[in-house]
Structures are given as structure tokens and as C-alpha cells.
């Protein structure tokens, strides 16, 4: 089973307005055949709007979408023939798993033998052999989502669009289905656009991430690039830099800077785009709790401790009132005075 491959899908300055709200403000993006692209961002950033524009469910307010240079934004959804998987699976309750999966093929008047063969293969790919004669109400959420995925891939669409397909599942099932989706993509290579607000999900699944904010693309890159080199404070916040410590810049060269945070000099932080007043972005797991005073060390007081098994999630406060999130396997308690070694080589400074 392989989709009809295209070389490139282009979104060219795609805009979509709802009344006065510009949900997409001129989105440019190229998707290559076979890629798994994740659209990532918080609620309201325009991810679903982008997906629905691709699907043909929403007309564009401006711009164009082309598939191998052929314009498609004026085609209705059925003429685009993309597969869709949404968070509510929308299965037909009165049809068995097999009939749900084969429905699209029978609508296309696929010959019986071929339909049977393709449904067999799709059932096997999503590991539903045991459940293929059941009805949706007899299935778990994860199994229903597998049916929805099988129903999309059985049509071998050129593009599969997924909108938060795992958000109705519990945490364990979400992880299991995430691996399943990755496995399916590895074996079938179907070009996929996947919408999520979950950075971990996006990092785990995608070949390329597109981070959106208020209808604008902030950064496009591989998971490694976006994770290690977020281009601005917003993307950094999304990539796990939960601490944004206010700092003033006291010295800088082309690559490194010295900044002052809570009266302490942090020497050798990475500079991205600098103004005098900036924030130092630090991941909670990057602080080290130390006993000795020393270079690049901040004093803080522990306020809240959550036990997470191997480590603790700690909220602490600097003397200037800045709140910090710290993950550590040191055992701490509220009220403890602690020293935090700042990993300057992993700190990013943004204006
Ligand atoms: P979520 O994760 O909550 O679905 P999202 O990133 O997918 O969010 P969109 O649903 O694309 O965001 O919405 C983008 C913006 O467009 C939001 O400001 C939203 O309020 C607005 N919007 C979306 N659909 C409509 C609509 N049918 N009518 C009016 N405004 C809309």
C-alpha cells in the first residue's frame, strides 16, 4: 500500500479570515512527498484552520495552494482526495469495523476482490484482525482511532491530514498510538500533515515541525533544529524553556554574552537576538542544584515540590521575586534555601 506520491505541495501566502479575525496571516510552506509535517502551536494559533484549508473544508481568503504546480485551492474536498483523521473518529455506528474501513472504496465502486484485499491489508496494518467484525461501540477509544486511521489510509491518499487524532485517548494509549502512527508512516511513507498542541508528540512524530503563533509561522525545521535552536522566545517557551529569567546584558561578542540575573553575572550564555533588557531561557531540567557558591550560580528559595518518581518538579523563587521551575533528583522541601548552577552553555538569551 503506497499513496499516489506528489513531489511538492505549496502553500503560497495562504490567508483565512473569520470576520475581523485573521486566523492565517499569509502562510508559506512547502511539503515534500513522503514527509511527516507537524503543525504545532497553542489553542487558537490557526493549526486547524490551516488543515481545513488544505482539506478543502474552508475556502481561502487569499493566497493559493498548489500540488506539483497544479492549483488545488479551488477544488472541493472530494476532488482533492486527501485522507482525514480527526479527534472524534466519526465512525458509522451501524457498520462493522471492516465495512467502516471499506466504505470509501465501495463508494468509489472498487471491484469486490480488490476491496477485500485492500481492507484485509489495512486491518492488518493497524492490527485490528481480532476486532474486524465488531461494531464501533464494542471497541476501546484506541481501537476506534485505529479504524479511523485505517479508513483514511485504505484509500491510499496522496496526503493524510490528522487533527489532534490522539487527544481523546488516555495517556498510556496516546503513547501507544503515537508509536503506531510513526510505524505506519515508516512502512507506508504516506505524506502526512499532523496538527497538535503537544510539543512532545510533534517532536516524536514529525520529520519537520512548523510552529505557529496567531496565524503566523514562527519557525520551520527538523525536530532537532527547533528543539536545540528555537528562533525566538515564543518557540523556546514551546520547546520546554519554561524559565524566562529577566536579565540585563553587561557584555557581548558575536556569539556569547554576559548577563546579570538577580544581581548575579552569568558568563558565556548563548545570544540569539539581543537587546539590553532580555530574558535568559532555561529548561527546568538544565539547572543543577549545588551546595557550593560559585560562578553562574543563583540563590533561590524552594516554594513547592511535586514528587514525580525519579525526580522532583520544584518551584523556587529568586531574591528579586522571579519564579523558577526546576527538575531535580535532589530531595528538596518547601523553605529550603538552594543554589542553582546555571548551565550557561545551554541558556539562550532573547530580547
Ligand atoms: P485549537 O487547538 O483550539 O483547535 P487552532 O490552533 O486549531 O486551535 P483555529 O481553530 O485554527 O486554531 O483558530 C484560529 C483562530 O480563528 C482563532 O482565533 C479562532 O477563534 C478563529 N476561528 C476559527 N474558526 C472560526 C470560525 N468558524 N468562526 C470564527 N472564528 C474562528
Image (cartoon, rainbow, N blue to C red):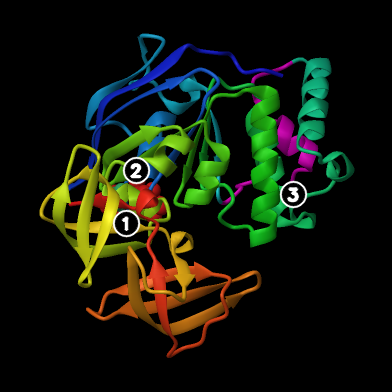
Kindly state the secondary structure of the residue where label 2 is placed: loop
Quickly name the residue at label 3. 143
Mark 1 packing: few (<14 Cα in 10 Å), some, or many (20+)? many
Q: Is residue 350 visible?
A: yes
198 lies left or right of 90: left
Q: Is residue 106 magenta?
A: yes
Residue 274 at x, y percent in the picture? 16, 47
Kindly state the secondary structure of the residue where label 1 is placed: strand
Q: Is mark 2 within 8 Å of ligand 1?
A: no
Kindly state the secondary structure of the residue where label 3 is placed: helix
Q: Give the range drawn in magenta.
A: 88-110
Q: Residue at x 48, y 61 (%)?
A: 285
Q: Can residue 43 be seen in this view?
A: no
The extreme right residue here reads: 130
Residue 3 at x, y percent in the picture? 62, 18
For the residues labelled 3 and 2, the Cα–Cα distance comes to 36 Å
User: Nearer the N terminus, badge 1 or badge 2?
Assistant: 2
Q: Is label 1 in contact with label 2 (beta carbons under 8 Å)?
A: yes
Quickly name the residue at label 1. 281
Q: Residue at x 65, y 41 (%)?
A: 148
Amino acid at each position: 500500500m503506497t499513496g499516489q506520491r506528489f513531489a511538492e505541495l505549496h502553500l503560497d501566502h495562504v490567508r483565512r479570515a473569520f470576520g475581523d479575525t485573521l486566523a492565517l496571516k499569509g502562510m508559506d510552506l512547502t511539503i515534500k512527498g513522503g514527509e511527516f509535517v507537524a503543525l504545532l502551536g497553542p489553542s487558537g494559533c490557526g493549526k486547524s484552520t490551516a488543515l481545513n484549508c488544505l482539506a478543502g473544508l474552508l475556502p481561502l481568503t487569499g493566497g493559493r495552494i498548489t500540488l506539483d504546480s497544479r492549483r488545488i485551492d479551488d477544488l472541493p474536498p472530494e476532488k482533492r482526495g486527501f485522507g482525514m483523521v480527526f479527534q472524534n473518529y466519526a465512525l458509522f455506528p451501524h457498520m462493522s469495523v471492516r465495512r467502516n474501513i471499506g466504505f470509501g472504496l465501495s463508494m468509489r465502486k472498487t471491484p469486490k476482490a480488490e476491496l477485500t484485499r485492500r481492507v484485509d491489508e489495512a486491518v492488518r496494518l493497524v492490527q485490528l484482525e481480532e476486532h474486524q467484525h465488531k461494531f464501533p461501540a464494542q471497541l476501546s477509544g484506541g481501537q476506534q482511532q485505529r479504524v479511523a486511521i485505517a479508513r483514511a489510509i485504505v484509500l491510499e491518499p496522496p496526503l493524510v491530514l490528522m487533527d489532534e487524532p490522539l487527544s481523546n485517548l488516555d495517556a498510556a494509549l496516546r503513547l501507544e498510538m503515537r508509536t503506531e502512527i510513526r510505524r505506519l508512516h515508516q512502512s507506508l511513507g504516506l505524506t502526512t500533515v499532523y496538527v497538535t498542541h503537544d510539543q512532545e508528540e510533534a517532536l516524536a512524530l514529525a520529520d519537520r515541525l512548523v510552529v505557529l503563533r496567531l496565524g503566523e509561522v514562527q519557525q520551520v525545521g527538523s525536530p532537532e533544529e527547533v528543539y536545540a535552536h528555537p528562533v525566538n522566545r515564543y518557540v523556546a517557551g514551546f520547546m520546554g524553556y519554561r524559565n524566562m529569567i529577566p536579565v540585563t546584558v553587561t557584555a557581548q561578542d558575536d556569539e556569547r554574552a554576559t548577563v546579570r540575573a538577580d544581581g548575579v553575572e552569568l558568563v558565556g550564555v548563548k545570544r540569539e537576538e539581543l537587546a539590553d533588557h532580555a530574558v535568559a531561557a532555561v529548561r527546568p531540567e538544565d539547572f543543577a542544584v549545588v551546595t557550593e557558591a560559585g560562578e553562574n550560580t543563583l540563590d533561590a528559595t524552594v516554594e513547592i515540590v511535586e514528587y514525580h518518581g525519579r525526580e522532583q518538579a520544584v518551584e523556587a523563587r529568586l531574591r528579586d521575586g522571579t519564579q523558577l521551575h526546576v527538575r531535580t533528583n535532589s530531595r528538596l522541601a518547601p523553605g529550603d534555601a538552594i543554589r542553582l548552577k546555571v548551565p550557561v552553555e545551554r541558556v539562550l538569551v532573547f530580547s
